[in-house]
Amino acid sequence: MSRIKRNDLTIYDNVADLWWSDSVRWVRTLKNLVPGRLKWFDRHIDWAGKNVLDLGCAGGFMAEALTKKRAYVSGIDPATEAIAAARSHAAQSGLEISYDVGVGEDLPYADASFDAVVCVDVLEHVEDLTQVMAEIARVLKPDGTLLYDRINRNPLARLAAITFAEDILRLLPQGTHDPELFIRPAELTDIMEKVGLCVGPSTGLGPRGINRRGDLIFGPFPSRAIIYMGLAQKPGASGVV
C-alpha cells in the first residue's frame, strides 16, 4: 500500500481549470467556507477602501468576495495554475485584483503596504510559520489587522480533518493536510506576539447546516477545538493598538 503524501499542495494546481466550475466537491467546500468566515471577519473590519492582501489566495474565492466589499485586493499563492485561474476569472467578472505567485515566507511587497492581511486555509500548510508571521507583520501598516483561521492540534481535530474530512467523507483530497503542522491557539499566540502583533479575539469555525446540493454550510462556531479563526493587530506609530 502506497504511503499518502501529506501537505500535498499540488492539489490546487491539479484542479485549477475547474476552480470556478462548481464541479469539484472539495473545491465547493472551500468556496462555501468564505461566507462563513466573513460572517465573523466583517464584525471586526470595514473592508471598503482598505488595501488587503489575501495570502494563500488559491483560485481567488476570498479575493473576489473582498473586492465586492470594495476593498483593493492583492492575492498571492505558490500555485501557479491556480493564480492563472484567479486572474482569468477576475478579468471575466470585471474585477480589478492584483495576483502574484509567491510564498508567505518571502512576500514581494514593501513594508507597511496593507491595511489588512487575510490568511485562511494557509497557516497549516507553510514551511516556516514564524517567518510567515514575521512577513505578515512587516507588510501590515501600523494599526493594520491580520484575520486568519487555523486547524487546532489535538486528537479531535485530527479525527475531523484527516479521518473524516479526507479519508471517509472525501470533503478534501487525501493528503491535503499534515497533522504535524496543526497548531494550538496558545502556540500561535506566542508566535504572533514574538513578531510584534497584538492578539485579539478568536472563535471557532464549523458546519452550520447543509445546502440543497448536500454541501456543508459554515459559520462561526462555539468551539475552537477543530478550526479556530481570529485576528491580531500591528501596533500603531505610538506602539498602542
Image (cartoon, grey):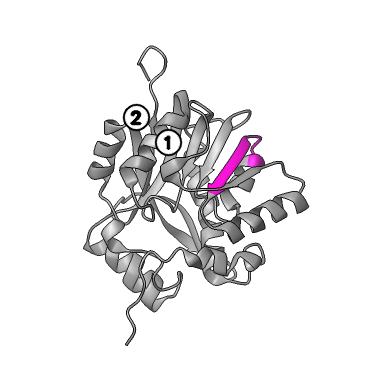
Q: What residue do we see at 43% from left, 52% from top?
A: 122
Q: Quadrant of the N terminus?
A: bottom left
Task: Assess disc 2: are there few (<14), some (14-19) or many (≥20) residues with their C-alpha within 10 Å of its C-alpha.
Answer: many
Residue 52 image-quadrant placement:
top right
| Whether residue 214 is visible | no
Rounded to the nearest whole Å, what is the CA distance between mark 2 and mark 1? 9 Å
Question: How far across and down, in percent of the image, does residue 219 sit?
Answer: 46, 52
Number of the label disc, if any, that sits on residue 179 = none
Disc 2 on helix, strand or loop? loop
Instruction: Check the image and name the residue furthest to the bottom.
Output: 1
Instruction: Check the image and name the residue furthest to the top.
Output: 238
Can you identify the residue that label 2 sits on? 197
Q: Residues in magenta?
A: 67-76
Disc 2 marks a residue whose amino acid type is Leu
Can you identify the residue that label 1 sits on? 136
Contact between marks 2 and 1 (CB within 8 A): the answer is yes
Task: Assess disc 1: are there few (<14), some (14-19) or many (≥20) residues with their C-alpha within 10 Å of its C-alpha.
Answer: many
In this view, 66 is above or below 10: above
Q: What residue do we see at 38% from left, 12% from top?
A: 238
Q: Earlier in the sequence, mark 2 or mark 1?
A: 1
